[in-house]
Image (spheres, rainbow, N blue to C red):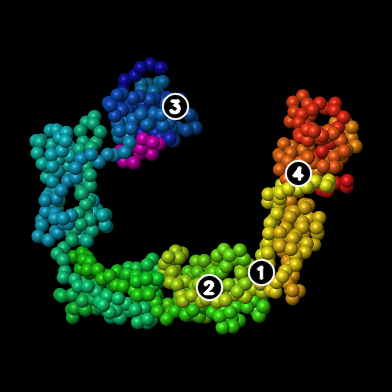
């Protein structure tokens, strides 16, 4: 390829697809440089993308990539992917992207240049100000222009260009001005009032930036001004049903009337009421046209009152906005209206209660709790219904019948009812207090702290003969023996005590399968074998209750006193599906059975642990030692091993 001469006509500049305006984020994983279709694009041309940067310290950074134009891609843009390793070094620097096309038949052709800034745009200059503005507001009445002033800033130099942009935040529209610095003094821009007037009741944002060749553009912080006209003498709104700034909800069962009045009201004004309380108890009214007589009245539905009822005094903010035709909007003073708690709430009721006693022996099935329809009930409200009682062991217990449950239309019309599971009540202590609690969140939130508590129902609960009905799980590891060994303590998690209450004591306890578990007459259950069985409790009236027991992790010690070698003992263990006695098993035996272990007819017993004693075997030695230790495999010994079922011997 021979060197050519740059043609006078530059090719179109490339595009960086990820750039926003003239800025490229420095944390991108990759950037796409797209070469547009250019004149006389042809196959086999070499296109060189040139990524020419200046770091923050003005150090030069250059990266290039080449691409041959494929015959089937002529007439299509060419994309180069520039990885993060070539982007991040240019943070807070400048980037010039261009490309060069080499033509084997003619010369090379240069493109126009794309100038970018890399990294976040820092707002380093102070904001401008507007001479006519006061306290963040600008009244355009009487103005032909507003003077926007840029004070002398750090680094101001003659020849710099300062650009001012003014943006209307509502309805769009912008104004752009440009001044070249000719002296080190304040710069002023005259903003026409025709640009300001459409922004009445809205904001205008002011910002300037400084541009000079080879230097990163510096931007100012924003100035935001509220554009508004002279104020009206607006008065507080008045709620007809309220007294002394508070509203009793029972006075608003049909809604509320709110009067708005102020001097010099005209039909050229539109009035909008804002009732702001809870999320579901807030509204913005439809507008009412002003009345020359000086007063208009709004009517709000009762649900807007109900949704602001809480456990204590709640506050609703009431105000109105006046929109003057061609003259912006103005807000009235704020009325903080207190919403009192709702009075006259009904107590929950439980079916089949006699006086204040709920006797389960006199109730068939699950007792029913009901609450009559309450004022301001609406679908979507959240309710909490629960019973507080005392467990058999004396601990407090809660039976949840509804937690943040949503009220439906049928319950709005007819009231609410829920069944209390009988088996849950039977877990409570006989002749104890049962409290029924009901709460409503009128605001429809799921936060119980927002809910109103209805009067508490207190009952005496008679459960009859009862015992905890859930399955008793005994799953602690235990080793049982057929020998006459003395067990000195219970295995952990292999025993539990469950006692009956109510009925007519004393009670008798019986187990269906003693091979699985045993039970004492004090209700203590001990796991004996793997499996499930049933415990039955009876009182003197022969009433009975039951629960199931699930036992697992029971293993039996097999004592082989007939084998005379390791091999014959190991073969017996395998034939019975047994497993070796591990170190943890030794610890269980030593901790739970008295030593020395009696009724052993051999002096040595192999444990078959295969490796617990390197070069030897783990044994239990009877006699003066009575201990686990290591010994030779050639020892004449019996064997111990574990099975999940009771051995025959």
Of discs 4 and 1, which sits in the foreground? 4
Does the magenta portion include 26? yes
Q: Give the labeled residue for mark 1.
A: 501
- Sequence-first tag of 4 and 2: 2
User: Label 2 to label 3, Cα distance in Å?
Assistant: 82 Å
Residue nearer the viewer, 338 or 490: 490
Q: Is residue 31 left or right of residue 335?
A: right
Of discs 4 and 3, which sits in the foreground? 4
Circle 3 — which element?
strand
Residue nearer the viewer, 148 or 649: 649
Q: Give the labeled residue for mark 3.
A: 67
Q: Which residue is at 86% across, 32% downward?
A: 637
Does the magenta portion include 470? no
Q: Which residue is at 73% across, 48% downward?
A: 488
Q: Give the labeled residue for mark 2.
A: 435
Judge the density around disc 4: few (<14), some (14-19), many (≥20) Cα neighbours within 10 Å: some
Mark number, residue 594: 4
Of discs 3 and 1, which sits in the foreground? 1
- Sequence-first tag of 3 and 1: 3
> Where 370 sits versus 226, above or below?
below
User: Label 4 to label 2, Cα distance in Å?
Assistant: 51 Å
Specify the farthest residue to the front: 624
Circle 2 — which element?
strand
User: Label 1 to label 2, Cα distance in Å?
Assistant: 20 Å
Q: Is residue 86 left or right of residue 271?
A: right
């Amino acid at each position: 390829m021979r060197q050519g001469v740059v043609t006078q006509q530059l090719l179109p500049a490339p595009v960086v697809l990820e750039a926003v305006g003239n800025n490229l984020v420095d944390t991108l994983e990759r950037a796409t440089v797209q070469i547009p279709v250019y004149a006389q694009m042809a196959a086999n041309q070499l296109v060189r993308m040139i990524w020419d940067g200046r770091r923050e310290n003005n150090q030069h950074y250059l990266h290039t990539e080449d691409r041959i134009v494929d015959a089937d891609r002529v007439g299509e843009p060419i994309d180069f992917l520039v990885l993060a390793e070539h982007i991040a070094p240019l943070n807070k620097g400048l980037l010039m992207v261009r490309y060069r096309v080499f033509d084997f038949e003619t010369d090379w052709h240069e493109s126009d240049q794309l100038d970018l800034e890399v990294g976040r745009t820092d707002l380093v200059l102070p904001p401008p100000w507007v001479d006519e503005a006061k306290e963040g507001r600008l009244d355009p009445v009487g103005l032909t222009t507003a003077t926007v002033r840029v004070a002398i800033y750090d680094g101001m130099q003659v020849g710099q260009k300062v650009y001012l942009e003014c943006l209307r935040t509502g309805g769009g529209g912008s104004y752009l001005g440009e001044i070249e610095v000719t002296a080190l003094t304040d710069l002023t821009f005259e903003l026409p009032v025709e640009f300001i007037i459409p922004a009445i009741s809205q904001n205008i944002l002011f910002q300037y930036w400084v541009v000079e060749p080879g230097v990163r553009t510096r931007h100012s912080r924003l100035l935001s001004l509220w554009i508004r006209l002279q104020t009206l003498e607006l008065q507080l709104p008045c709620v007809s049903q309220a007294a002394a700034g508070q509203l009793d909800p029972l006075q608003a069962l049909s809604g509320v009337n709110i009067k708005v009045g102020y001097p010099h009201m005209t039909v050229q004004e539109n009035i909008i009421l804002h009732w702001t309380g809870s999320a579901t108890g807030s509204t913005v009214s439809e507008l009412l046209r002003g009345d020359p007589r000086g007063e208009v009245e709004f009517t709000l539905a009762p649900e807007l009152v109900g949704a602001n009822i809480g456990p204590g005094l709640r506050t609703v903010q009431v105000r109105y906005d006046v929109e003057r035709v061609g003259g912006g909007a103005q807000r009235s003073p704020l009325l903080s209206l207190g919403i009192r708690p709702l009075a006259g709430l009904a107590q929950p009721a439980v079916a089949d209660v006699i006086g204040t006693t709920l006797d389960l022996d006199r109730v068939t099935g699950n007792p029913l709790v009901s609450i009559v329809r309450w004022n301001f009930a609406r679908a979507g409200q959240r309710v909490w219904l629960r019973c507080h009682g005392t467990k058999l062991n004396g601990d407090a217990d809660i039976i949840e019948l509804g937690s943040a449950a949503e009220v439906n239309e049928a319950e709005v019309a007819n009231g609410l009812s829920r069944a209390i599971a009988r088996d849950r009540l039977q877990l409570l202590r006989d002749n104890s207090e049962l409290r029924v609690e009901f709460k409503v969140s009128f605001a429809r939130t799921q936060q119980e702290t927002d809910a109103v508590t209805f009067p508490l129902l207190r009952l005496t609960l008679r459960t009859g003969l009862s015992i905890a009905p859930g399955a008793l799980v005994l799953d602690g590891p235990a080793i049982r023996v057929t020998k006459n060994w003395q067990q000195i303590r219970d295995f952990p998690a292999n025993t539990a005590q469950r006692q009956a209450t109510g009925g007519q004591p004393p009670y008798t306890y019986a187990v269906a399968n003693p091979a699985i578990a045993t039970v004492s007459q004090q209700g203590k259950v001990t796991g004996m074998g793997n499996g499930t069985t049933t415990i039955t409790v009876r009182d003197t009236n022969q009433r009975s209750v039951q629960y199931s027991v699930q036992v697992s992790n029971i293993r039996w010690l097999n004592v082989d006193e007939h084998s005379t070698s390791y091999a014959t003992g190991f073969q017996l263990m395998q034939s019975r599906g047994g497993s070796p006695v591990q170190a943890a098993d030794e610890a269980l035996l030593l901790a739970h059975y008295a030593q020395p272990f009696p009724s052993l007819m051999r002096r040595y017993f192999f444990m078959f642990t295969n490796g617990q004693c390197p070069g030897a075997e783990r044994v239990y030695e009877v006699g003066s030692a009575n201990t686990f230790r290591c010994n030779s495999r050639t020892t004449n010994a019996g064997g111990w091993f574990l099975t999940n079922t009771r051995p025959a011997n």
